[in-house]
Structures are given as structure tokens and as C-alpha cells.
Amino acid sequence: MGARPQRLVKIGMTRRLELEDRVRELGDASVSFRFDTHALIFSEDAVGLEGRLHAQLNERRVNKVNLRREFFHATPAEVRDLLEKIAGQHLLEYRDTAEALEWRQSVHARPVTD
């Protein structure tokens, strides 16, 4: 049974009013499980903030060829701490432990045998 990557985050932004619509859209067939949201942040300069986060975590980038792939080897807590340093008190919501419903169900599901 494979382990869930505990040190892998996607850092992205949306201008949508319904934030979870974008999260659902991202968790399509190209990823194993739906994305869990660990942090919500409001910023007047979301593009700039996202760019600063990506720059700070650049050495930890998963895909070093396609920079539009916003995955980094980091924990949600590490990103939260970095956000507090570069963005101040704009954190609207933070969850260290994700719901991860699909992953938890997969881990506990027993394989079907004949």
C-alpha cells in the first residue's frame, strides 16, 4: 500500500467567487485524489504573492521544466509560515490536517479477491 505524499503541496490562485469550484476542477482524472484545501488567503496582489511564494520555494519545485505546474515538496505548515513572513495577516482559513476523504477511503478499502 503506497503512502500519501505528506510533503507535496500545490500553490495556486483563483479569482473565482466560489473557490472550491476551481479546486474541484483541478482534481480531475490527472491526479489520484481530489485536492484538499489547507489555506485560503486574500490578497490585493494575489499574482505577486503567488510569484513570491513560488520564488521562495523554487528549489523545492517538483516539475523544474514546466513552471506552470505549481507543485512543491513542502508541508502545508511550511507554506503557512512562509506566507506569514511575506504576506502578513491575510490568512483567512488554515487547516493543517486535510479531510482527504478519498485517500482515507482508499487506504481502508480491502482488495476484492476471487
Image: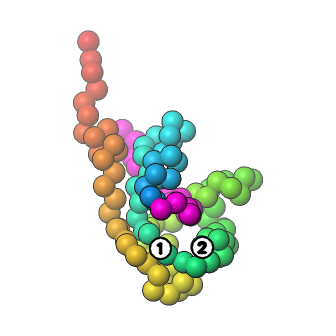
Q: How is the image coloured?
A: rainbow
Q: Quadrant of the N terminus?
A: top left
Evaluate whether residue 56 shows in this view: no
State the SS at label 1.
Answer: strand
Classify 64 as above or below 52: above
Q: Is residue 71 magenta?
A: no
Quadrant containing the C terminus is top left
> Looking at the image, is 2 positioned above or below residue 15?
above
Which amino acid, by three-letter code, is at mark 2? Ala
Residue at the spot 61% in from the left edge and 65% down from the top edge: 60
Q: Which residue is mark 1?
A: 41
Taking the spot 51% from the left edge, 36% from the top edge, the residue there is: 29
- Check disc 2: other Cα within 10 Å, few if <14, some if 14-19, many if 20+: some
Q: What residue sits right under mark 2 in the picture? A: 46
At x 33%, y 43%, the residue is 102
Indicate whether residue 12 is drawn in magenta.
yes
Which residue is painted at 66% across and 76% down in the image?
48
Examine the rendered structure and indicate whether residue 39 appears above or below residue 112: below
Asked whether disc 2 touches disc 1, contact meaning CB atoms under 8 Å apart, the reply is yes
Which segment did they paint magenta?
Answer: 1-17
From the top left corner, tell me how far across and down residue 113 is, in percent.
27, 17
Crowdedness of circle 1 by 10 Å Cα count: few (<14), some, many (20+)? some
Q: Quadrant of residue 97?
A: bottom left
